[in-house]
Amino acid sequence: MSKGLRTAQYKSIEDEIRFYHSTKKELEQLRINVVTGSSFQEFRDDNIGGGSSGMISNPTEQRALLLQMDRQIERMQKVILALESVFNKLSDEEKQLIQFRYWDRSKPTWVWIARKLNMDESTARRKNRRIVLEIGKRLGY
């Protein structure tokens, strides 16, 4: 597919771009959950006098859950930092290319994107490939 990346890696990076906004939103929610401790209160049971409360009572399990959340937060932060550092250096034309290619709900074709940006289809694809490769480099691929 591209120099230095296998097809699966390239598609994985494209998915990270595609889901950038939802990843950012999910990261904020995870941070809020950690700060407020609501991750343990989500399954609160107000059934007084009956059964378990649904909360994790084992301290080891609580630490394991926090560690898992911490790893998830760390991965999301790494992805968002890589994407934003590349996005911030893009020209307006390249930003539009990313917008059309990954965030436009109508799923435009490369031909449409290239026409909209007044460039050849191969140029649009090449610019996109360069951006994806740069993001991949920042993610350690």
Image (cartoon, rainbow, N blue to C red):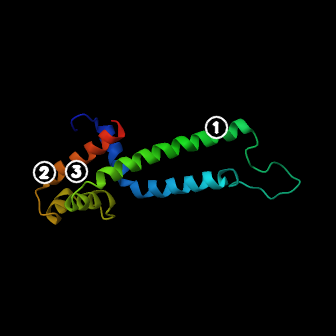
Nearest the viewer among 9 and 33 is: 33
The residue carrying mark 2 is 122
Cα separation, mark 1 vs mark 2, equals: 48 Å
From the viewer's perspective, tell me whether residue 116 is left or right of residue 33. left
The disc placed on residue 64 is: 1
**Does residue 131 appear in this view?**
yes
From the viewer's perspective, tell me whether residue 31 is left or right of residue 14. right
Q: Determine the image quadrant of residue 6.
A: top left
Where is residue 19 shown, x and y percent of the image? 40, 54
From the viewer's perspective, tell me whether residue 44 is left or right of residue 114. right
Indicate the amino acid at tag 3. Answer: Asn
Where is residue 101 shown, x and y percent of the image? 27, 57
**Does residue 108 appear in this view?**
no
Could you say whether the residue bearing mark 3 is in a helix, strand or loop? helix
Extreme right residue here?
Answer: 49
Could you say whether the residue bearing mark 2 is in a helix, strand or loop? helix
From the viewer's perspective, tell me whether residue 137 is left or right of residue 41. left
Q: Determine the image quadrant of residue 88.
A: bottom left
Q: Quadrant of the N terminus?
A: top left
Q: First in sequence, mark 3 or 2: give its number.
A: 2
Q: First in sequence, mark 1 or 3: give its number.
A: 1
Indicate the amino acid at tag 1. Answer: Ala
The disc placed on residue 128 is: 3
Q: Quadrant of the C terminus?
A: top left
Indicate the amino acid at tag 2. Answer: Ser
